[in-house]
Amino acid sequence: MSPLAQRRWNQFRKNRRAYNALWIFLTLFILSLFAEFIANDKPILVYHQDELFVPVLFDYSEQDLGGKLSSAANYWDPTIQELIENSDGWILWAPVPYHFRTPDMYLNGPAPTPPDSIHWLGTDDAGKDTFARLIYGFRLSVLFGITLTIISASIGVIVGGLQGYFGGLVDLIGQRFVEIWTGLPILIILIILASIVEPSFFWLLGCLAAFSWMSVVGVVRAEFLRTRNFEYVRAATALGDTHLSIMIRHVLPNAMTAALTFLPFILSGAITSLTALDFLGFGLPAGSASLGELLNQGKRNLQAPWLGLTGFVTVGVMLTLLIFVGEGIRDAFDPRKTISASGDRS
Amino acid sequence: MTALVEVKDLSVAFGNSQVVNGISFSIDAGETVALVGESGSGKTVSALSIPQLLPYPYASHPSGSITLDGEEMVGAGKSKLLAMRGSVVSMIFQEPMTSLNPLHKIGRQVSEMLVLEERVTRKNASDRVRELFDLVGLDESVRIDAYPHELSGGQRQRVMIAMALAQEPKLLIADEPTTALDVTIQKQILELLKDIQKKLNMSLLLITHDLTVVRSLASRICVMTGGDVVEQGPSRKIFEMPEHQYTKHLLAAEFLELPPDAENEAPIIANVKDLHVRYPKGRHWFGKQEYLDAVRGISLKIQRGHTIGIVGESGSGKTTLGLAILRMIPSTGEIWVREENLQTLSKKALKPHRKDLQIVFQDPYGSLSPRMTVNQIVGEGLRIHEPDLSETEKNEKVLEAIIEVGLEAEMLERYPHEFSGGQRQRISIARALVLKPKLIVMDEPTSALDVSVQAQIVDLLREVQRKYDLVYLFISHDLKVVRALAHDIVVMKDGQVVEQGPAQEIFDSPSNSYTKELLNAAFMPDEYADAK
């Protein structure tokens, strides 16, 4: 790590709140990446007829396990379980033996059922395990948010940078376009589009990206406008540097703090938009694991408060953690703070 | 006669750090006292303590007392302070551009205090304002209902003085009253202050870093450094028999040696012919485009190892000329370097020349990217012009340049804000030097620095010039520094050359009246204000 990165990292670590938030968030996120191993209706390992099966990774048909049907094996099926037991085999289930797609056929009451030892957070109105839906939904939201943030921040920095650096006509036209584009009501456009096209993950990503890059443009443009008249930029011109190199090496680093302070907001905004769309039913296709859909269920089933509470707490904690981390990053990139913290002012 | 102001054992602290350590001085009625020191010496803070204008309670006085006109100021109540400010003590500040509210007419700003405190009517107030304007030398051409932007810097400073004088205070505190002004205007303002002080028999406390200002104005001088008054006494004594090491150091910085001789027959490395620069001004709808001629037909022959001093007041086009020669702004005319006319070269063909032509800017804060380390800043030129260098070779060259300008190897990984103004200027010079250029345009490189640091930078520039046979195009309004460096002088006014020739000749016997005026203002005659 370069001394600069080292210093920033130290500064970030000094901020206990941000540091802890980052660890909690990373732990949750990495755990959720292995959601298939945590909550799945397929066992992780099956030992059967002296053979080891890994159903979590590969699909096996019943015939593979010595059954009669050629369709995919349903490990909840008593026949299959019997088959395995008879051959002195064993089944290693995931800690939560339910997938977000599969309803529990053996509920001990009408869905949604309240939390108990089998379904830790209860089930939703289709009898699906809430906890399973939660971890898959969390993973999806975060992945969606991060991808959207990267895309829209990149577009925003490029557009804002070009406008600010060149100014004049480029800026004039760019600003007018951004103003008009910002004026479009995003949610309504998405709802209209959702009635034409069947939304999917990437389709939603593209649509939201098309409307969320403007938030960075303003700050980046202002920073570029301010910085391009500085003497160090002139000095770089005198050194014979090219426009592109000046923009990237001299102006951009100074504009990055401004953009960085916006990133956590874009990220949480992206997650919120996805949740909102799902909540309204215009988001991901029905049946997907999503926090918005969970909230919507909570709204529809007020008699089952565990649904609403789970969704609310998850979204709340996730957004809070992200903001804490964002604050820490912003402060770590501030050279004044970095120095006063390391204490070697001369 | 009792003193009007009696400061005893005054300390000032901000938070936990003490910035002024128990200083004492007094000002008699009708006397002019100067607090002289470099930035950070605590002079402004000490002076602001008199009217208690510091940001209390963050600022505090651990010890000391200030008696103003018989009243104790330290710890005085709000209503008492309000009564004292304006009527007993008032202030003028350094920056005339920002001390006036741009949205109010100047007459109203001056009369505001009168209307507030003395309860005069608006009508009478405007008569009084006119009277004050006469006093500060603003004639009928300056309307009472003018807005600040319609006035020049000098005129604004006069309005500020009129405001301060509105209630005929017994003490006027002037915080660097002339620093932001051109030399000739500086001189006028100083004479005005002297005049008014005599007329109103008022006491004057001058805060300044510039010893020249003080010499003809102050009867007593307190020299401050690091929060202490290290020496105080009558001005004549301070100048002729300084006792403290620091005072001697300041005085030495004030009188720089003349530059070493340069070869007369040195080859010409750059030849500028008939250079014009014009900026488009605002245009009316369908109207004709108007232009502002910043540089009008300037020719220069630049010899190797010489320093050409370009002097003039603000707006004379001297910086524009420097930028135009480097082709950083469009211009017409010819710029011949190494048998090639830079004006006709494409951006690509110009690039190899960029290596030879470098620039150092005035502002040591704005000229270094705050997000790059010293190593990166100095290494930029090498990255662009010598991309074949390995990382080690590059680091070696950067280190060499850094040591050349008097910095140390362990500073390489630090950021600009960790350095003082003088050190930053050294970094800027290292950035230019690392490419081994032939010509460096110095755009007021010493103007933002304290006098003693100025002297160090001048020494450094001389040393480097001798070593590499460099050419400096030294742009400055500070004639003292120019005299210490330049072999040839170009005096500019309104984009034109008014006088051009060897430095010695121009300094000894200027032929143009404008040059004479400039020199007169910069090198004030050796007269002292009388001690009372």
Image (cartoon, coloured by chain):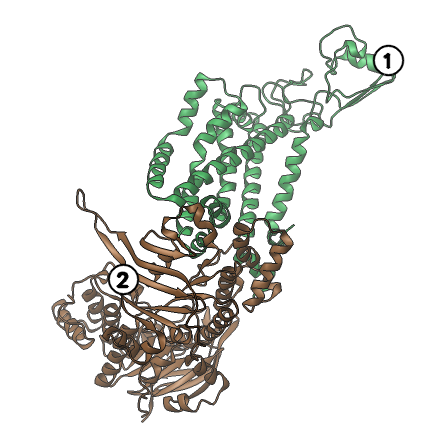
Chain colours: A green, B brown
Position of residue B444 measured from the top left corner of the image (x, y, whole percent)? 39, 66
Q: Looking at the figure, which quarter contains the C terminus of chain B? A: bottom left
Mark 1 lies on a secondary structure that is helix
Q: Amino acid at mark 2?
A: Gly
Q: Nearer the viewer, mark 2 or mark 1?
A: 2
Position of residue B424 measured from the top left corner of the image (x, y, whole percent)? 50, 64
Q: Which mark is residue B329?
A: none
Q: Amino acid at mark 1?
A: Asn
Q: Is residue B112 above or below residue B415?
A: below
Residue beneath label 1, please?
A86
Q: Is residue B198 above or below residue A318?
A: below
- Chain assignment, label 2: B
Toward which corner of the image does residue B235 lie, by quadrant? Answer: bottom left
Mark 2 lies on a secondary structure that is loop
Q: Which residue is farthest top?
A: A68
Closer to the camera in the image, A84 or A62: A62
- Residue B23 seen in the figure: yes
Toward which corner of the image does residue B164 lie, by quadrant? Answer: bottom left
Closer to the camera in the image, B286 or B268: B268
Give neighbour class at mark 2: few <14, some 14-19, many 20+ (Cα, 10 Å): many
- Proximity of marks 2 and 1: CB atoms separated by less than 8 Å: no
- Residue B413 seen in the figure: no
- Chain assignment, label 1: A
Q: CA distance from mark 2 to mark 1?
A: 103 Å
Q: Residue at position x 50%, y 23% from top?
A: A203
Residue beneath label 2, please?
B495
Q: Looking at the figure, which quarter contains the N terminus of chain B? A: bottom left
